[in-house]
Image (spheres, rainbow, N blue to C red):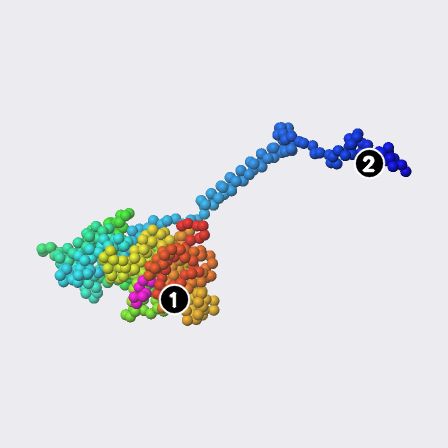
Amino acid sequence: MPLNAGAEAGYGSVAGAGGLPEGEGASETAPLLAPEPVYQWQPMNRQQLQAAAGGSGWRAVRCYLVVLFWLAWMAMLAVAVAIVVISPKPVPTSLKWWQKCLFYQIQPDLRSDAQAEGSESINAACERLPYLRSLGVGALILQGVFHKKPSPTNLTEPIESLETKTRIQHLLAESNKSDLKVVLDICEVNLLGHQETVGYGNTTSSRSATDVLRLWLDRGVSGFVICDTDPAYSVETLLEWRGVFEEFSSRQDERILVVKQTSDVLRPLNVSTQSNITLINVVLKSILPTSQQPLSAEEVAEAIETQLQTRPDDTWTSWTVGGEVSGELKRILLVLMMTLPGSPAFTYKEQIDQTWDEKTKHPEVALFSTLSHSKSREQALLYGSLTFLPFNTTYNFSSSLLSNSSVSSPPMLGFLRSWGCAQFLVLLNVWPQPLSLDPAWAPSLPETGVYVASTGMDHMGSTSLYSVRLQPYEAVVIKLFRPGGYS
């Protein structure tokens, strides 16, 4: 085969193969791949857009979908507004003055200042009135004005002495200046035993008990306190008294009747025929039973638990301590009285009377002031519902509610005050050993809160229920917060 046969036959090149250019040197210079075409971007016109979107029909579908979306959104908004409007919500109750204030029981010495002890004289009591008002006290229960049974006395006996009458009138005037109401304690006073006969020359006139009530009401007294064992505690007498009260009452200054409960259960009044008339405004009730000796921790815990589990009736309650307790438990009872539904009634010479110097800071005064201001502005503490927290009340701690499940650990007492979204947790430790709380007993409650008050006034800021630990004879008030919520 000739060596140049390939050249003649075109060896090494394929003419026109693959679209390559023909000619000399084409096999050497032609690219192996064809170059990609270059496109120039141009916006689509109206016809092209309609074609890409599926035509004019697709535009109508899109319009219908947009209208449907907004209609659905408006419907959901209307349903949400309707749910908010028709859903039950707490309505603030219009409270009377005797439902919002703190009562303070005082028994001043009606003798002259020279005969009376310095801190118990009328003048000394009048000097303390502005201080009591600054602590949140709204009304005084004036005791010791009349002699008790079995002395046959009546409502006008104290005013037989002109000097005694002047001192009582001075106390009423100073109380009015300090914006303090005065409720007169006539418990166990012989009101219905006899009519008072007053001589005027050769004539006599009979003055009934209702006339004497008018006399004291006209002098500025805002109400009276009787016992449930008094003869006056009857439907007939109280209906007559109610008519007298209405003569002196106004919308802002209603005259009230307070009944001191001396038994475990208040004797009911048969007022079925007068169901629209309120014969009793306040029931003065003791938390602890009466005792000649200080009650033990077990007795105090049992009495508190009984009161917390008792279903309240329609009558407004004013709480007093009642029995004697040790000094360690007095602060716990102070916290309890301030956080229970109702109006607390404190007794003369309790913790807030230890000092009258406003510059001196005492834990008792600070605790009283903090609880008083919290109760005045927090709706949950004013008229919120009470839920007794079911802590274990026996010594069988197989399913203990405390983190320390030791058999020797006594139970912790606690309850919840709720109004709307606001919740206050009150925990009481009446025992001589510290107790820790296990929040597993109430998984529905928020886990965090902020301290409002404590018996030692040494807890501040936010806290977690998992870290709450009560010291011996300690009580705390915690306002609970839900995550992301405000109240």
Q: Residue lying furthest front in this view? A: 3
Residue 484 lies, with reference to residue 265, above or below; the image says above
Q: Secondary structure at mark 1?
A: loop
Q: Does residue 252 appear to the left or right of 470 in the view shown? A: left
Q: Does residue 394 appear to the left or right of 294 in the view shown? A: right
Using the image, tell me which numbered label, if any, was put on residue 12. 2
Give residue 272's quadrant in the image: bottom left
Give residue 53's quadrant in the image: top right
Name the residue located 45 percent from the left edge and 65 percent from the top edge: 403
**Residue 331 magenta-drawn?**
yes
**Image quarter of the N terminus:** top right
> Within 10 Å of the Cα at label 1, are there few (<14), some (14-19), or many (20+) other Cα atoms?
some
Q: Position of residue 398 (x, y in %)?
A: 47, 69
Viewer-proximal residue among 310 and 421: 421
The secondary structure making up most of the magenta span is helix
Given the image, on which type of amino acid does mark 1 rest? Pro
Viewer-proximal residue among 391 and 359: 359
Using the image, tell me which numbered label, if any, was put on residue 95. none
Name the residue located 43 percent from the left edge and 50 percent from the top edge: 485
Q: Position of residue 203 (x, y in %)?
A: 11, 55
Given the image, on which type of amino acid does mark 2 rest? Gly
| Residue marked by disc 1 | 434
Name the residue located 29 percent from the left edge and 51 percent from the top edge: 97
> Within 10 Å of the Cα at label 2, are there few (<14), some (14-19), or many (20+) other Cα atoms?
few
Viewer-proximal residue among 372 and 452: 452
**Residue 174 visible in rendering:** yes
**Residue 440 magenta-drawn?**
no
Tell me where the magenta segment starts and ends, as one range.
Answer: 326-333
Q: Secondary structure at mark 2?
A: loop
Q: How many marks?
A: 2
Residue 80 lies, with reference to residue 458, above or below; the image says above
Residue 21 lies, with reference to residue 221, above or below; the image says above
